[in-house]
Amino acid sequence: AQKVTQAQTEISVVEKEDVTLDCVYETRDTTYYLFWYKQPPSGELVFLIRRNSFDEQNEISGRYSWNFQKSTSSFNFTITASQVVDSAVYFCALSLYNTDKLIFGTGTRLQVFP
Amino acid sequence: DAGVIQSPRHEVTEMGQEVTLRCKPISGHNSLFWYRQTMMRGLELLIYFNNNVPIDDSGMPEDRFSAKMPNASFSTLKIQPSEPRDSAVYFCASRPRQENIQYFGAGTRLSVL
């Protein structure tokens, strides 16, 4: 069975701090995709990144970076120099290659205080 | 470009009433998904369509729920009769054929009193 675990329910930081959101996944398949979505207070789900299981290169996009490690089944998300606008719930998700289903973690609520 | 459009954004109804949620996917996308988000169960997939055909409805909670996709630009999720435990945020998402990324609408917040 497939599963995504986000052990951190809530994280609070002060602006300009770096913060890492953890994601651990479980699957026996060798081909799969990993995702991060952001849900700001307004409620919509915003796509941030997709990674396939064959690409373990870390990715950086502005203040955002992602660390994918198959050895530990983790796909962690780091925000550098956090800002109040980063306050949101962040979801990690998994889908298998031959299905369209997204399996979501329970989300991590990030609060960034000024 | 317009994203996934859901209507209404908020719906308040009384137990026993019929509720219809609507979704317009992104033009050119061939897959459409309905999700439900609750505090207890998180985000869960209810049903999805490929090329307007229902592929997997194993997440639909019970017979009171039904979904249709009469054409490539429109889908509905109907609850009849509604119950208080159906209160949740319902999301629609669409995905293009050539890319495994689902794009979500803003959601419909349903309250059944």
Image: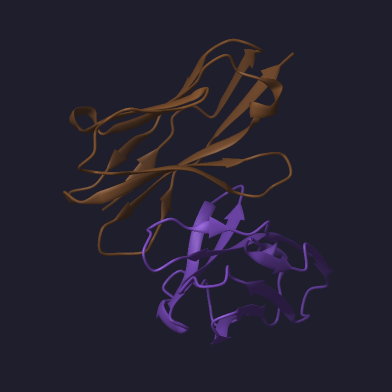
Chain colours: A brown, B purple
Above or below — where is A54 with respect to B49? above
Above or below — where is B62 with respect to A37? below
For the C terminus of chain B, the image quarter is bottom right
For the N terminus of chain B, the image quarter is bottom right
Q: Position of residue B38 (x, y in %)?
A: 61, 53
Above or below — where is B74 with respect to A93? below
As drawn, is B75 to the left or to the right of A95?
right
Q: Residue at x 52, y 16 (%)?
A: A80
As drawn, is B36 to the left or to the right of A105?
right
As drawn, is B61 to the left or to the right of B113?
left
Above or below — where is A111 with respect to A53? above
Q: Position of residue A4 (x, y in %)?
A: 37, 42
Q: Which of the two residues, B82 or A75, is positioned nearer the viewer here?
A: A75
Q: Position of residue A86 (x, y in %)?
A: 64, 27
Which residue sits furthest bottom?
A: B70
Q: Which of the two residues, A12 or A19, is positioned nearer the viewer here?
A: A19
Q: Residue at x 32, y 27 (%)?
A: A58
**Residue B109 figure quarter:** bottom right
Q: Residue at x 78, y 74 (%)?
A: B15
Q: Position of residue B23 (x, y in %)?
A: 65, 72
Please give the count of numbered marks on the rendered protein.
0
As drawn, is B88 to the left or to the right of A79?
right
